[in-house]
Image (cartoon, rainbow, N blue to C red):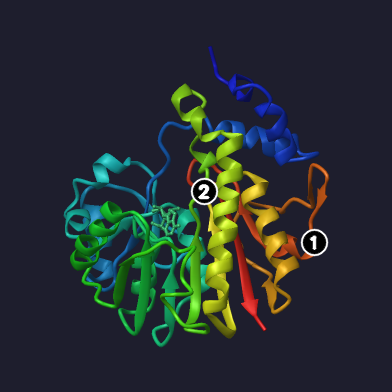
Amino acid sequence: MKKSLKNLPNNWINRFENYFPDNNNILNKVEKAFLIEKRKPVFRINTLKTDINKVLEEFKNNNIKITKIDYLINSYLVENAFENEIRKLDCYNNWEIYLQNISSQIPTIILNPKSWEKVLDTCSAPWSKTTQMATLMENNWEITALELNKIRLEKLKYNIKKQWINIVNSLQQDATKLSWVFEENSFDKILIDAPCTAEWRINLNNEKSYHFLSRKNTLTKAKLQKEILKSVIPLLKSWWELVYSTCTLAPEENEAIINFILSQYKDLEIVKIDFDIPYKIPALKKWWKQIFDSRVSSSLKILPSESTEWFFIAKLKKK
Ligand SMILES: C[S@@+](CC[C@H](N)C(=O)[O-])C[C@H]1O[C@@H](n2cnc3c(N)ncnc32)[C@H](O)[C@@H]1O
């Protein structure tokens, strides 16, 4: 029997309806996305290691149809092959391309790190955004990449070596405890791609994936996200920017976090994200009894689809 949102555990359908108030069309799109078994692959070209035309030629020779994604940088959507086929190509095995979903690439593009900036990536593994930033920075200047998990950190060293990246200083470090490690005002740009409940990974055909829906986990993650932000904000220089992102739908980890930060830090302003992507939806104005600061609507929310994952992104600037 065809699965639907009604198959989710008790009360979650009600919660989901409230994620998209007054818009059944969006709820239907989310339901469809939760039934997708395999998304269309997206890759970006590692221009530190290869020539774009060489990669395009290899796809052509293998009869794999790709379309350039205009709003990303050197990124392509694969139309007629899945990831297992891409993983067989030479360009993949030589680290000349990197598989990374559309939505996952956008926080870095919004942060827009330049080759003369000092950047902090607070929650880095498995390094998709760190390596994307290094490519955009043309392997110049400096990225400090933190990760709590030692095993995940070790993989970075291998990953960046293979991609010919040498501007990343990696540290095993809890991002909630940074005042002992870095001086205030140390960084020009900061990315907080926060640990989250990753609710977009629900697959209605796989009941095991329903564990991503956990009220307790949502509240634990929201607490951790606030702690990370509180520890990181003092490290940002005045007039510079920070991007906060999650890949979960839960408003407690998205709008409510930005609402909290705007209420606590008068020296931070939100920067409106004007990003032209077909899958974006407005941020929530309220969640249950909590009415959000109207500035929270300047953030970006991306719907899951056959080619996108769910993402929430907000950009903050220190005055
Ligand atoms: C959403 S993932 C980051 C994905 C990564 N930015 C990328 O694009 O590949 C969150 C990461 O934060 C790490 N993490 C969790 N708690 C942390 C903490 N307190 N400090 C630093 N990293 C943490 C997790 O181990 C996980 O690797």
Residue flagged by tag 2: what amino acid is it?
A: Cys
Say whether marks 1 and 2 touch (CB < 8 Å). no
Regarding residue 5, the answer to whether it shows in the image is: yes
Residue 251: x and y, percent?
A: 67, 47
> Which quadrant holds the C terminus?
bottom right
Q: x, y (%) of residue 112?
A: 49, 75
Badge 2 marks a residue whose secondary structure is loop
What's under tag 1, amino acid-wise? Asp
Q: Secondary structure at mark 1?
A: loop
Q: Quadrant of ligand 1?
A: bottom left
The residue that disc 1 covers is 293
Q: Which residue does the numbered mark 2 point to in the structure image?
A: 196
| Label 2 lies in ligand 1 vicinity (Cβ under 8 Å) | yes
Few, some or many C-alpha atoms within 10 Å of disc 2 (few <14, some 14-19, many ≥20)?
many
Residue that appears at 62% across and 36% down: 29
Residue 61 x %, y % = 21, 52
Please, which residue is most extreme toward the top here?
1
Q: Is residue 43 above or below residue 110?
A: above
How many neighbours does mark 1 have within 10 angstroms: few (below 14), some (14-19), or many (20 or more)?
A: some
Closest to the observer, 213 or 311: 213
